[in-house]
Amino acid sequence: MAKQSYTDILFGKQEKLPPVIGDRSRIEQYGTCPLQAYLCKKHNIDVDSQLVNSCGIGHELVEEAVKYCQGSEDWDMIADHFLNELPKVRPDVQPDVIKAARFVTDELNNMPIQRLIGCEIQIDCQLLPADPDAGRGPIILTSCLDMLFSGRESSLIVYDWKFGFKKRSNAEALDLFQTIFICWLLWQQPEYQSVETIHFFYKETRWGTVAYARLDRHKEWPQLPHLTTEMACQGRIMEAVKLWLSDCQDAWPEPKKCAWCDAIMECEVANRLAKKLAGKIGNIKKFVDEIVVLTARLNTMKDLATHYVKKHGEMAGTASVIQRKKPAEPKFTLAVVKSEVKPKSEPEPETKPKPKPKPKPKKGKKLL
């Protein structure tokens, strides 16, 4: 920052501090595990794999097809244009790109193209004002939308293309940080102040499946009465931003998180098995062989324990006991439990004989 003159300070002229840009992916890293985000930033870790390249190329092809048809106003050709450009990608990743984009053409044909607002849209909003005392400019949050459509009755539709192997359920889609971050950003845009509902679709193009989440702005957040969806999203984002601004280095290691972590080899507190697997990326065969051997050994141990218990009785460990299954308890019906013999003190009610039904007249032929 340039040094200010005494004249500027005297007349209250302060140098405008540059904004601090917070991208969704970086803030999400801090919200998932601050140490992961810190290590990726410290070691400048940039993932460059065949899967990442395939996903990037898939997004580029969809954007190119949309812009091509948007210029010619011939929306019926959007899927054909995508299909024609698909074989022309980089030769080294072409087979995987074709597999990843297997169901893209179906989605392009079925999407509400007449309601399209834009493709690869970058949106942002100011979360916090500038803080001159801390020497920090305003905090700007930003994210990119793959596709945005206008919906019915003051609603928006968001498409996010997923070219990877991971599948998501609808419940997982609602809990994803990406979902709540993008929806909250859309609600902060001046042109979408009247929008109440956002329909979020994750298009898993490799499998042909869709994960869907619906967020209603002023409705109560599930299991949290008197807290609207917008406020719940804002609270989660604010906590992640605080971790990002404080450059937090806390570690929250869990097996699932560590399996997806890009900085696992630099982390000293990572899950041991996840780190072991990450270190054998070039020798996955050995890791799979270990799983097969351990599974067979475990099955043998269980079988031996079963026969031991049958012969000698239960086996007690430190925190658990192996014993034979208890036989099912006999269950008695209501008729067996109740006594059929009635007390002698109570006189038996007189039973009246039922009247015999009158015989029905036989049907015969009518005589003329």
Image (cartoon, helix red, strand yellow):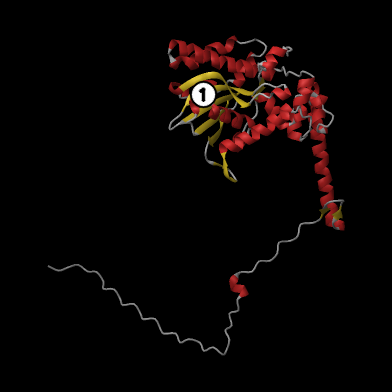
**Residue 72 placement (x, y as % from top left):** 44, 10
Most extreme residue toward the left, as rendered? 368
Q: Which residue appears at 53% of the width and 18% of the height?
A: 119
Q: Which residue appears at 59% of the width and 83% of the height?
A: 341
**Residue 95 placement (x, y as % from top left):** 64, 16
Three-letter residue code for mark 1: Leu
**Residue 350 placement (x, y as % from top left):** 45, 87
Q: Which residue appears at 58% of the width and 86% of the height?
A: 343
Residue 299 lies left or right of residue 122; in this view the side is right
Tag 1's secondary structure?
Answer: strand
Say above or below: 271 vs 68. Answer: below
Which is more toward the observer, 25 or 90?
25
**Residue 305 placement (x, y as % from top left):** 84, 50
Say above or below: 233 vs 59. Answer: below
Mark 1 Cα within 10 Å, few/some/many (few <14, many 20+)? many
Say above or below: 218 vs 165. Answer: below
Can the viewer see residue 279?
no
Residue annotated with mark 1:
148
